[in-house]
Amino acid sequence: MKINKFTSLTIALSILFISCDNEEIIESGSDYSNGILVSGEGSGAGTGSISFIPQDVSSSTHLIYKAENDTELGTYLQSIAFSDTNAYISVDNQNTITVVDRITFEEVGKINSQLELPRYMEIIGGTGYSTNWGSTASDTDDFIAVIDLNSNSVTKTIPVALGPERIVSKDGKLYVSHKGAHGVNNVVSVIDIATDAVTEIIVGDKPDELVFTQSGDLIVLSEGAVQYDMNWNVIGNTLASISKIDTNTNTVTSTITFANGEHPSLLEIDGTDLYYSLNSGVFKMSVTDTELPTSSFIEAGYINEMSISNNQLYAIVASYTSLSDFNVYSLSNKKMITTLKVGIGASKIYFNE
Amino acid sequence: MNNKIVFFICFLAGLHTHAQNDSIVNSLDEVTIVADKNLKDNSVGYKIVSINDSIILQNKVSFTSLLRHNTSIYLREYGSGGTSSARFRGTSSSNTAVVWNGININSINNGSTGFNSLSVNLIDNIDVRSGGGSIKYGSGAIGGSIHLNSRLSFKNHISNQFVSSIGSYQTYQNLYKFSYGTDRFVIKVGGELNQSANDYPWLGTVYKNENGSYKNYNININVGLKLSEKSKLSLYLTKYQSKRHFSGELPNPLSANEKYKDFNQRILLVYDFVNNSFSHVFKAGYLTQEYRYFEDKESTIYNYGKSETYLGNYDFYWRLNSHTKIELFSEYTSIFGSTDQFSIHNRKQFSQAAIFKQNFSELLSYNLKVRKDFNSDYEIPMVVAIGLEAPVYNNLKIRFNGSTNYRVPSYNDLYWPGQGNLNLNPETSKQIDAAIVFKRKKSKVEVDFFLIHTKDKITWIPNGDPERPGIWVPININSVKNKGVDVSGSHVYSYSGNVFNVSANYSYVLATDLKTNKQLIFTPKHLFNATFSWSVKRWKSYYQFLYTGKIYTSEDNLDIFSMSSFDVSNIGMDYKIINTENSQLALGVKINNLYNEMYQTSPRRPMPNRNLNLQINYKF
């Protein structure tokens, strides 16, 4: 069509121009409840995105936000938080939390001022608490943005230590793991919501995932850090650990450390079972164990995220240059049941009940 | 769309123009010296497109836009003025060598050249050479090489040129060139200052190109001295500094906060001795490059990369007889490179090449070339090349070249902390190119068929090294096959004082990852550009058209991760107020993106909407 303005060009050449676009017809107006949402960070190869998988894990639909809103989320999509009605999508490089209806995924608002590299958000009532790295050029400007979810605006910020990451809450207190952004940190902040008072609990280096046990203890997985000399040669490692924090006293009551050089990641709790990932294996232990398991439970490869549901393990092997793999394993026979494709740089699994 | 056609027809019908002399030229015969004097001679069998200074000044906003509108190279730009990388015949960004006066100036740290990190507006001529050129131009000349050439003319003259332009979004470009010469001495001095707020509105959004401003300056000094009838000494000096902000991307461009600075200097001294059957050329060069990247533009903390290159080379030509020449080429380079992430590494290389040339002009001319490098870091395979040309019939000739080439790993590939891989091998390629050339006085058409097979492509992947789980590591993994067709043509037509000129380039590239059998990402299959001009008396008008085909951004070639094709048109007109032998004063106006197309060369980063540029060009 646009070729018309160049009737002066040879027809022979113009034939070559006719591109063979197979426009994908993406349905809009869908219902994304009762299924699994997988968020992908995105990369240079494509936008951060959310894929929907129905509960029977039979198929996946990509780019559901783009399908409903005809615009992209950008990079890098870190996490999604949920209120009763909405989903809050944190995209760090865009300094934006996009608010969508959690069933239709139609956009209902945006929070894009007073945020700087937002990572994770915890919602309590009508208030969101978003962990922000601030400028990566400064180690001292990291903060929690307190967001009024009625007006979608930041009402105040609470300064915290370097590199706040995951955030969870219990009994009027926020617990924030400080993995350390591009550096290393080793604390869990406890923030009294009523007073904004911040206290810090020292754990192992690079604490990331936080889970509560049925008895109310907070379990922290610290990945441990790799240490470099001035010339960036590796000269050692700090130890990874699993720490248990008594949330009544906010003290570490037990710590299990990993061998030197082992850097586990990911932490899931299913009843009294804990799962973590180390190298190509998923390991299983009980919350009451005092020793680490000696062999892996399932070999799932180098995974970027996992989740346990319906006696199944969902494990993501991420690709940053193409769609990622969402692999489903049976916890009973430890075999892979099925595999689906999910977004570029897939990194989080959520259940949209 | 209809009003576009109407506009175009009205434009063609309503204007008067002037003599066209800035078509793509293929020869330029003056009493000149150039540092890389045997470029043409060594390119028998290769396609070379030359871009002269008037075309350069017609596209002077950026090197990126100059190449985009005049060659079949795909340039990916992270928003107008941002990081820009080239894909020549579908090869990767580190597979295009940029060669300044015969010296490869690709960055030691990342192996490539940023096409918005240098200005070519003071350069006299650019030759774009398709195909492998490692024999003479070293690492990275796989897809092709881009030659920036300065020319020094030994003749009595004194000339000045002043070009000033003002464009939309507070874009100001000013340059001044001075040239003085006698039959024994010549000096050329040029200076340039460019700046822009570059805050164009993003079509279809409520945003502007936030944080996209830039400012750069460039100084060139070239001096030539005829020591005797047989020997000449020349000095080439250039200095470039720039400060750019990097614009953001949708959906929230307000989050953009990055700043980037470039500091480049190059000095080259050339001694040239010619007698009847021998010639010697000695060169000594010193080049420095530095970038500073500020993740937060307000902060004083930055990441940097810098390098210093010392080089010396010697060219020996021996004319055995009227149709046979031998050239021996020796080069020694020592490069010191570092970044904030790793301390200084020194790479030394000695290269020896030999070229055998025969030219039986009515029958056949050909080159045979061989080169061996001795590198302190790697074993580099011996490379060979052949080029030949033969007239076939009347105005038809055939060209052929075949070569092996390489790209050594960059410092980032090797030394990046925790991620570099010291066990990398150089990328190597084998390629052939066969062409039919039709050339008459006023027309030229070249059709090239090419095939490039690159092995051991250096690719960064997670878990590339089993010893470092979860870490992105570069490894030699992919094999890539590029095949395609390049078509270039130009034609001049004169009719009662009117001169019409058309030149066009088209390329079709299938660049296939041999493991996945998919097209490489950010590699359009179709690229087309054309320039039409019409000159009559003191008027000249021109129309530029660019078409870029659909691009996949993910390796699985999914439509959901692709960028659609686009076309962009520019239109311009110049009028010479003064037009004497010694003095020309021209006023020009150019409308870029005439049809206000919304297009992107990088996802979520809209390119400029319709914008205007006014220029004054005074030569005296």
Image (cartoon, coloured by chain):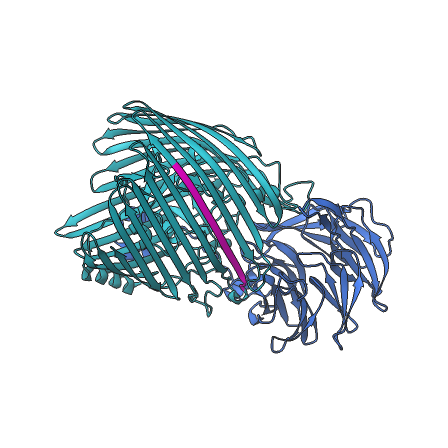
Residue located at (32% from left, 60% from top) = B164
Q: Residue B143: percent from the left, percent from the top?
A: 43, 40
Dominant SS of magenta comes to strand
Q: Which residues are magenta?
A: B256-270
Seen in the picture, residue B348 relative to A216 is either above or below; the reply is above
Does the stretch in magenta take in B259? yes
Q: Which chain is blue?
A: A
Looking at the image, which is closer to me, B261 or B385? Answer: B261
Q: Is residue B143 left or right of residue A217?
A: left
Q: Which chain is cyan?
A: B
Q: Residue B485: percent from the left, percent from the top?
A: 36, 40
Quarter-of-image position of residue B465 = top right
Tell me the quadrant of the picture where the C terminus of chain B can be found: bottom left
Seen in the picture, residue A213 relative to B64 is either above or below; the reply is below
Is any atom of residue A152 visible in this view? yes
Q: Residue B539: percent from the left, percent from the top?
A: 20, 58
Looking at the image, which is closer to me, B411 or A86? Answer: B411
